[in-house]
Image (cartoon, grey):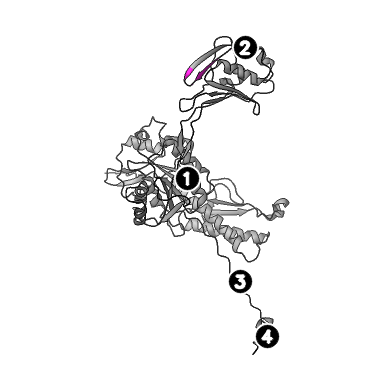
Amino acid sequence: MPNGLSVSRVVRVQVSLALRAAQGRDFGALLILGPSNVILAPEVMRLYNDIESVGTDFGTVAEEYKAALLYFQQSPQPLDLYIGKMERQATAATAGKLTGAVLTSTEQTLTNFTAVSNGAIKISVDGTVKTITAIDLSAVTNLAGVATALQAKLTGTVVAWVAGSNQFTVTSATTGATSKIGIPTAAGTGTDIASLLGINAAHNPTAVDGLAASSSPLPSVNTALNYSADWYGLVISDPAMTDQDHLDVSSLIGAASDSRIYGITTNAAAVLDATSTTDIASKVKSAGYGRSFVQYSQVNYAAASAFGRAFTVNFLGNNTTITLKFKQEPGITAETVTAQQADTLQAKNCNVFVRYANDTAIIQEGVMANGDFFDERHGLDWLQNYVQNNLWNLLYTSTTKIPQTEAGVTRLLTNVEQSMDQSVTNGLVAPGLWNGGSIGQLSPGDTLTKGYYVYAAPLSTQAQADREARKAPVMQVACKLAGAVHFADVLIDVVR
């Protein structure tokens, strides 16, 4: 028997399932890259939630296990740990090179050079100072000929005229760490041609020393960056890491599109020396790397423990943010240092798990290599992603368009304010005096009663091109970090 007419002819009901909101990044996950041949291509990394699983895969003597043990020993215990393989890529030795200044059209005039029949130059090649005389340029027909005439006299080098950039270059014929070309000094005889070539000190040429053949960890770090945004901190558990390796990785982490941080552990005695500027802590500080964390410790990979403590912070909770100073590092023997050495570490922005005379030990000072406090770097990275992700989800999950009207902009501003509310709830941001520049109705000296102020210019002031491109007005947020107390003074006055 027929079913009859469809009810939808009279009552039509459609059900639309809302899109799932995008998830924010995890700012509590560490990646350890190590040399063990356990995780091999095409696999990039594995996720672990306990030390037993790491031991099963790597054994208990592997470098990855040693770093993971310090990470999971923290209390409270972090949850997520990724481990990947660090493959080193060999790089060939390079030659020392001196690149002259870009010559002007006047400086390139050929008669400047053909007027020289008894030229001279005093230059250091691979550490040996050479004074070359009787350089005859009177018959050259072009600047390439000038380079050829000099090279014929200056053995052990390759002299070239680079027409594309209008520069002379002098390159050592050798490679490696001893391959160097110095900036010429006054020859003291004949016609000094260094100024004609633009390679004398007055022209500010560029001298780059040669490098020995090496292997770089950067390809593996770059692969991990491209593979996943699920990890936030990085520790490399490879005893072969050099200071230059750490600097290279610090540079890459600082330039990465997704915010990350890098942990370096050093036991070099030079870190404790106030006169040393060549230790890794001094170098990373000098480079201003705000995403590198350096710790002095006799225990390898101690930075993994510091990260393990920090990564237990749940930014979605109430009053959950912490400062890294005063925290513990289970499994790590505290360092005993003098007051002068402690001051030196502090001056170099190098952290240390240190013993105090009252039978306690703490992490101090909890800073990044550029001096930023770790908790602020960590918290602001979370805040950037949290605001970004929530605003994305507002646009992504809205079943109707958000109009380019004041009401539509208000929806965007409200969304940003809700994100900022959580930064106040977790303790990252707090009410305080605004001492930045003027923003909207906010002026220097005003009090941020909520801890933040959100502003967007009226739509009436928006450029027509931006409106046609469907851009919202720029939204600005002024906020005050809650900070943390690291030092205290108490004055006690006593009278009889």
- Front residue of 230/413: it is 230
- Whether residue 218 is visible to the viewer of this picture, yes or no, is yes
Q: Mark 4, residues whose alpha carbon is within 10 Å: few (<14), some, or many (≥20)?
A: few
- Residue wearing tag 1: 220
Three-letter amino acid code at the position of disc 3? Ser
153 over 10 or under it: above or below: above
Task: Kindly state the secondary structure of the residue where label 1 is placed.
Answer: helix
Tell me where residue 127 appears, x and y as whole percent: 47, 20
Three-letter amino acid code at the position of disc 2? Asp
Three-letter amino acid code at the position of disc 1? Ser
Disc nearest the viewer among 3 and 2? 2
- Residue wearing tag 2: 136
- Front residue of 431/55: it is 55
Residue range corresponding to the magenta coloring = 116-128
- Front residue of 426/309: it is 309
Rendered image quadrant of residue 395: bottom right
